[in-house]
Amino acid sequence: MIDVGVLLFATVAWLAVLAAIALAAQRERIPRALARHPLVLALSLGVYASSWTYYGGVGFAQRHGLVFLAVYLGPTLACIATPLLWSRVLRITREQRLSSLADLFAFRFQSPAAGAVVAAFSVVASVPYVAQQFRATEQSVRVLSGPGHEEAVGAVFWALLTLFTAFFGARPAAEQGREDGLAAAVAFESAAKLAVLAIVGLVAVLGVFGGAGGLADWLGDHAAEVEALGRPVREDSGWTSMLVISFAAAFLLPRQWHMAFAGGAGDRALAKAAWAFPLFLLALNLPVLPVLWAGTRLAPAEPADSYVLLVPQLLGQGWLALAAFIGGISAASAMVMVTAVALASASATHLLLPLARRTLRRNVYARVLWLRRGLLVVILAGGWLFHRAQPHRGLLVESGIVSFVAFAQFLPGLLAALFWERATRAGFLAGLLAGIGMWTATCLAPFLPELSGLDPGWLDLLREGAGRADPAVYVTVTDTWSLPTFVSLAVNGATLGLVSLLRPPAEEEREAARLCTRREIGPSVERATVASSVGALEERLARLLGREAAALEVTRARIELDIPRDETRPTELHALQERLHRNLSPLVGPVLARTVAEADAQAAPGAFGGRAASGALTEELRWLERRLARGEATTTFVGAAKELDLLRRWLRSVLAQLPLGVCAVGSDGAISLVNRRLEALVGAEERDLVGAPLDRLPAPFAELFARAARAASAGEPGADEIEAHVAGRARSLRVHRAALDPLDARAASGGVVLLVEDRTEQRALEAQLAHRDRLAQLGRLAAGVAHEVGNPLTGIACLAQNLRAESDSDEIRARAGLILGEAARIEAILRSLLDHSRTGAVPKPGEGARARVGRVALAEVVAEAVRLIRLDRAAPHVRVDQACPDSLVVIGDRRELVQVFVNLLANARDASEAGALIAVRGWIEAGQIVVEVEDHGCGIPEELLAAVLEPFVTTKRDPSGTGLGLPLSRSIVEDHGGTLTLRSAVGRGTTVVVRLPLAGAG
């Protein structure tokens, strides 16, 4: 025997170890990567194995043979169905922030009554199972230390569990998230009980049978017992029904649901747990039969439920018996803790908070926390009292079977919620209540004969079976759960289906069903109501939570969505409302959260609740596009949905890359869609435009778009052209408009699409072409004038030469020389004008493209450019200081280089005052020619210094500026292998630096 003080100390010490682990994980002393490892989730799901498995599994195997394996094959089948069931449930609970099974049913059927019934029945169904853990603890104390002290140890165990669970299980409502502390503690206890049970099984084989060979010999001598183990399976005595209820229990038991879905697990962790959890259950059940056979050999008269403790004790392994006791404490404590936490949260949300809404207006987070802690104490006290009141006879697992059958009643409703859109709240409630009634009559009442008043003899007959087999064979082939299971589930499912077919679902049920039964992007917003502003939403929320908590929740939701305080767009307000609903769901439940978030909504013009039917569809399209664009939909599309989403993204990419600005306006007058080009034109981002009315656009687009939209709605397609200043630049815009056809019968119109074409560059190009045409005409005119002037000029020159040669007067000869000089000057001017007019001309037949390329002296080029700009008598007269030595020779096209310096000198002249000095300096540097054209004019703003080298950008205010001079000059210089750069300061002038390769000697 082990002293009861040692057992009590071991109980306290073990719970202290679990508390330390939970606290370390909660405070991140344990690395977060380890605390949230997928293996931790798999081990935390091991809370499924309670004292039923640890102690009662051996007794269950003795009574019902290999049927005990069905208890673990059921969860294995459930894990195989993870893509079909668990993943769907995880997606819904994650998107809607549902923390319990009651939350899911309340959300799916949009019914507070559904949540309340599920929460209440979950508490009732869990009490026998919680009581089982206290019974197992007291029995283990009685086995190890003898009778007389078990109740005291059990009371201490209850008190410690209550304190531990209240501290680590009930978290502040403002800090909802992953429960790393509780999950880590449960995972550790699962690993511990697996290790201890494996050691007990190994010791049983080695200590009792002397090894595997001895066990095989013993089994050969007891072939009848071995054959009897498989009889219930062969005769299907409870096998199929146990598979069904254990399949349901794998994810419908409150502790399983809490660890799998409410703990914040991800898809990756759940996928790994789907194979790791069954392996854990397999390893946990390998020692069951060896321990059963060892106990049968050592103590056949003792109850098999105690063999896990008796075998080590009878073998003289006191340390192992104590370790087995700790493993049992671990299995019982984990089950009780997680079950109490899950039930307290669901009960507070669906049973008490709807009745105590006024109490939440002050210090809501603390009140909800203490309310849950109080419920934890009540639930654990209820389990303890039920344990003390019930008769302790029969197998340990019987109370667990009662709970298994009870929670299986949620299976028809869950399948309907996930796969049948036609299911209604009336059908669900009717079916569940009918199933509860059958469970009470066929399962709970026989379990509590003193309370039910049924004949004990009949109950014993039902429980023990119509007759026993040979007394030497310890397996009974009659079970007590098949009839309650099949009858209650049949009545439940039939009632659900019949009532749902007789009564059609409400509109809100259809919307929730679309989300639950298919992989929807999000709930439809057609029926939703939205407040007119953020302040109105906060005011509405303050009616439940008080002003301080309401301001905190609204601010948190705005920060998460990056929504400003003054937001008024219905789409953004609806998104804020949905986020508030999600954030409040863990605090007050999904139904109450949605009721608070949407109640008394005063829909603004164009808002969801108050908009006309014609605007409903466009608002819904904007909502869906917003969800897709922001990546809030976590569902992976498959099949046709995947192909349609691929097509949508491709069309969206095409739209985004269009060179035209696109703006779709819904029938409610708000912007539904824009592309990147329109964002650039308007100077605003898509998130600020979509959902906004047209009058929120900056000028001149608000008035322009509104006028175009009215015209399109009136059936006047066409286009408008305007000249406007956009971002400080003159723009020529052409706005095309067209009305869209409605997509379905819900919309009277499909809205309007506007295409904005920026014709600024085209207009500038047209002006440049016209200017070039004028220059070409001027060139032809100049050529004709030069020809006509050339003949008289030649005559004048001849006469002047004759006069100078024949005259004896020095004065006349001097004047004749002046006439010849001026005639030569006129000839040089005409030659330069003719050469410049032919710049860029197409080479003559047989002339190569580079026929004009040769050695060019830049001094001559600059001199000719100076002569040309002086021909413009309308321009201000400036002085040009030329300092280019004759050694500056390049290989290039003389006419193109003259064009470059004409452009540069003309720009310098236009930027300078009359009489100002323009300096042209040239030198050789590092094998390159550097020429600077410097003026002291108005200069170029820094923000335009790079832009002026692009086409059609000019700083000139008069119409002569086309914005093509500098880009053309840079292009010519680069064609010659050089570079053109600018230095400028406003009010101090501009310097243009031209670098060209120096021609080699030749």
Image (cartoon, grey):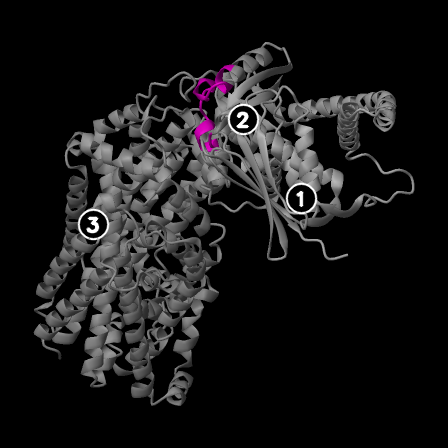
**x, y percent for residue 782:** 79, 23
For badge 2, the amino acid type reads Gly
Q: Which residue is mark 1?
A: 973
Residue 702 magenta:
yes
Whichever of callouts 3 and 1 sits on the residue coming sooner in the sequence is 3
Residue 213 seen from this side: yes
**Residue in the picture at 18% in, 37% down:** 364
Q: What label sits on residue 257 in the rendered view? A: none
Q: Quadrant of residue 815?
A: top right
Q: Nearer the viewer, mark 2 or mark 3?
A: 2
Q: Which residue is mark 2?
A: 915
Please count the marks in the image: 3
- Depth check, front residue: 90 or 947: 947
Whichever of callouts 1 and 2 sits on the residue coming sooner in the sequence is 2
Q: Callout 1: helix, strand or loop?
A: helix
Above or below, 926 against 809 in this view is: below
Start-end of magenta stretch: 684-703
Q: Quadrant of residue 580?
A: top left
Q: Callout 3: helix, strand or loop?
A: loop
In the rendered structure, the answer to whether residue 758 lies left or right of residue 419 reads right
Give how far apart the Cα atoms at labels 1 and 2 are.
Answer: 29 Å
Residue 94 magenta:
no
Whichever of callouts 2 and 3 sits on the residue coming sooner in the sequence is 3
**x, y percent for residue 244:** 42, 54
In the rendered structure, the answer to whether residue 573 lies left or right of residue 541 reads right
**x, y percent for residue 564:** 34, 31
Q: Which residue is mark 3?
A: 170
